[in-house]
Image (spheres, rainbow, N blue to C red):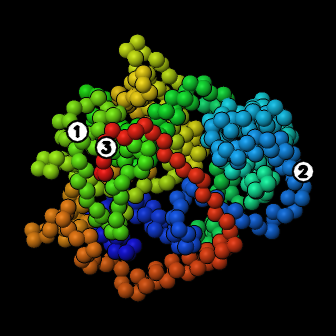
Amino acid sequence: MLLEEINRFWKAGLMEKNKKTPLFAMIILIMPIMTGCSDRTPKVSDIEIMQQDSEVYSFEKNDSAGTERIAEILSDIYEEAAGTNTLGSPDIMRRMVVRLGENGYAAVDSGNQVDMTQAEQVLEFCKAVDEKETDELTIIVVMEMGIRKYDLKTEDGNVNIVRGYYQYDRNGSLQNRSTVSYPADFWQYTEEGYLIFEGSYFSDESYILTLSDTSEHTTLRIMPLDEKCREYNRKYILPVGYEQNNLFLCDWSEDNFGDLDFYDLFDRFYPMLCGRPVPYTADENSGFGAVYQVPEELFENVIGAYFDMDRETLRSKTTYISEFAAYEYRPRGFYEAESPDIAYPEVVDYRENEDGTVTLQVNAVYPNGNMSKEFSHITVIRPFSEGSFQYVSNEILLPEGNHEIWWHSHRLTEEERENLYPEYFGEESPNPAEAPIGEKSEPVSILTAEEEQGLQDEAMSAAKQCMELYKESEIAYPETEYRGSHCLFIGNP
């Protein structure tokens, strides 16, 4: 199946146009093999591999007293959260960060949603780095199920990091799950108030996959941020984000909706409005995939909840089937995969306007690119008294020089789809909406039979090695909840 889809890309000329898509799709397809036969296939971002190596034990002996003290400081908050199933909630994370600060620790949460405590310690350490003095610093990052502890040392302008990951056990103790040490190859305190550092360390399991050391990026907000900015971000920007949609990645307004993809926005808005995942999912054919007819009432209610637009405009930018009073809808598939490595939005300023709208200035923070502002955008929203709201406009503010929002993949055009799947579009072919999913034509391979077999053998060999490495490992899956108001459409979609 994997080779078949790659060959389709070459035949359609899409590999050159969007080289990243097949690679990311291959990663997605091989992840279930790498992680074993779990009942749930996790996202890459959901996985925290907890495996100790021989270097951990000596460090644990010296550090156990420090982590025991941290666990004791947080014990009553942890017990309350564990008893009420609120671990990872904003309130619990905030209380833990504040408690650590009261006990002298520089601390922040993993999502940078709480102002760092004892930030002056970090600023003093950064000053010592700049002036090539000797200094030490510990930073605690509070996570849903544990903490990350960074022990930093600087001398002659160089910084060395020891990073430990600790997870709560059933008794509320912090157990070491991994510890690594590396020099900071990149170190910067940015204009936006972030401390960013990066370094690499050797990992057996990572080396099998990449033939290189493991790179680790850390991005921590040091300077405080207006709580109103965070409130606006959580309510209006983060629920949509930058993944598999272009709401904040292009210029548009209520007078001209530009290049907005309303199918991607249906995917994002439906859970926000209805409180559950989109029911129109891809089938076992990861290529051409399923085609649905979404009732006009549902599609228009979902989009209309967040935009002030008439149905004629919406229908002109989508495929509307009048005889069925429905919108044609295709879930994203193999050929439209995006990189999971993307920026996240952070509202850094706002202006409440006389007409009731709110103008938000948003920075795209990209940890793996060591950037606290990859680009910015100005987004205007229209809040209503009952808690609902509409998006009014968006304007991208790019940095000087060439810039590409490289992770985003547009949905295939009809021409690209025809080139990839001619068997569904020929004169004697069935209508795509009626085509039997299970029937496929054999693609013309760009590889010889020997080359295809060689690739398959290499993939299986790598998978077997990784299974050996991970067979004793634990995988943590954070809880995910969908929250939203009651869906406007009543009935089964």
Q: Where is mark 1, residue-wise?
A: 314
Q: Position of residue 249 (x, y in %)?
A: 39, 39
First in sequence, mark 1 or 2: give its number.
2
Q: Residue at the location (56% across, 30% down)?
A: 230
The local secondary structure at tag 3 comes to loop
C-alpha distance separating marks 3 and 2:
57 Å
Q: Position of residue 121 (x, y in %)?
A: 80, 33
**Left or right, residue 345 beside residue 116:** left
The local secondary structure at tag 2 comes to helix
Residue extending farthest bottom: 450
- Whether residue 93 is visible to the viewer of this picture, yes or no, is yes
Q: Residue at the location (52% across, 80% down)?
A: 460
Front residue of 490/141: it is 490
Q: Position of residue 250 (x, y in %)?
A: 36, 37
Amino acid identity at mark 2:
Ala
First in sequence, mark 3 or 1: give its number.
1
Identify whether 210 is placed above or below 223.
Answer: below
Amino acid identity at mark 1:
Leu
Callouts 3 and 2 close, C-beta under 8 Å: no
**Left or right, residue 341 beside residue 205:** left
Q: Residue at the location (68% across, 39% down)?
A: 93
Identify whether 69 is placed above or below 200.
Answer: above
C-alpha distance separating marks 1 and 2:
61 Å
Label 1 crowd bin: few (<14), some (14–19), many (20+), radius 10 Å: some
Residue 490 numbered tag: 3
Where residue 86 sits, quadrant-wise, is top right
Q: Where is mark 2, residue-wise?
A: 65
